[in-house]
Amino acid sequence: MAEPIRNKRPDVTAPTPQNTPASNAPISSHAQQPGVASIKEEDMDRATAASIFAQNPKLVQMIQGRLGSLIGRSSGYIESLPTPVRRRVAGLRAIQKEHSKLEADFQEEVLQLEKKYFAKFTPLYEKRAEIVNGKVEPTEEEVKAGDDEEQSLLAEDASAESAPKQSDTSENVTGIPEFWLSAMKNQVTLAEMITDRDEAALKHLVDVRMEYLDKPGFRLIFEFSTNEFFSNKTITKTYYYQNESGYGGDFIYDHAEGDKIEWYAGKDLTVRIEAKKQRNKSECRRAAADEYRFVNCACSYQADPYR
């Protein structure tokens, strides 16, 4: 049977082109296929709370209404201050507003500067893609400049003496195979999320591009070669930000939209196929008894969530 893969790591914050860490991780990823997590007490608390709210929609409405009435309401502290102090607090608010305006201008100028240099980076990215995919070969000057830098790095590495010798047995290799998969596995955050199942598809990733939107936001473009998993040649994900900046002048993430992946039959990497063994009558009776005990336990836990 097919079921969605559980325990996929949630996105805690929305990624931006500027917040990628620079630290490296080993090429080989130790990420494993998703498994079934053990039940923790806090997970039971959440499940119990969700069950209670699901069965009591009026309770949810009452809580939402109560919270809505509290938004923007003063705690009364400012009103309790002497008049001269309240005037000073009002003055500080005015200063903070001016600071926020300058911060918004600063963020806007930073964005325009990023766009300016992104236009200068683009030809380099295009040349990189051509070399990676075997469309062109680097010039002798580029090879020499790269070799000089590599030799200087190896000279600083004490373990360079024991490094394996280069192999010339694959002279007919085109471009740089699995370049983007290796790059992703060298990035700490991404390496932790990539499973063996993902690697099989990411081996076909041939280019990654980024483009800014006319409105606040950007789009990531992933280009794939022909593969056994999906028919898409490109998959995009677009990140949108609110038109108005936040209190501190930063752009506020709004939402993201991604392309629908056209999976081939039986190749959807977001589901896992599990074969269930037919149980005999005694196993079914034991399973029914276990389920009965679990239901009783869950009911008593829901009645007294603090036990």
Image (cartoon, grey):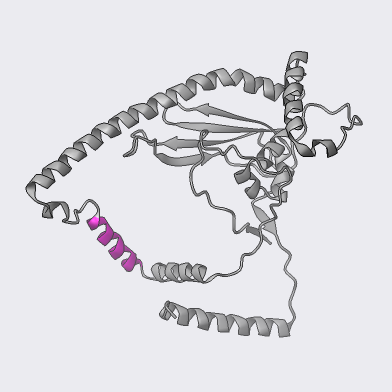
Tell me what residue is drawn at x 59 percent, y 80 percent.
291
| Magenta highlight range | 57-70
Residue 251: in magenta span: no
Query: Relative to the observer, which residue lies in front, 82 or 47?
Result: 82
Indicate the quadrant containing the C terminus: top left, top right, bottom left or bottom right.
Answer: bottom left
Give the percent coordinates (x, y) of residue 10. 54, 52
Can residue 121 be spotted in the picture?
A: yes
Q: Does residue 294 lie above or below 108 as drawn?
A: below
Q: Is residue 52 left or right of residue 205?
A: left
Give the percent coordinates (x, y) of residue 12. 50, 49
Per the picture, the main secondary structure of the magenta-coloured stretch is helix
Residue 62: in magenta span: yes
Q: Is residue 87 left or right of residue 245?
A: left
Q: Is residue 213 left or right of residue 152?
A: left
Query: Relative to the observer, which residue lies in front, 232 or 9?
Result: 9
Give the percent coordinates (x, y) of residue 150. 74, 27
Tell me what residue is drawn at x 48 percent, y 40 percent.
256
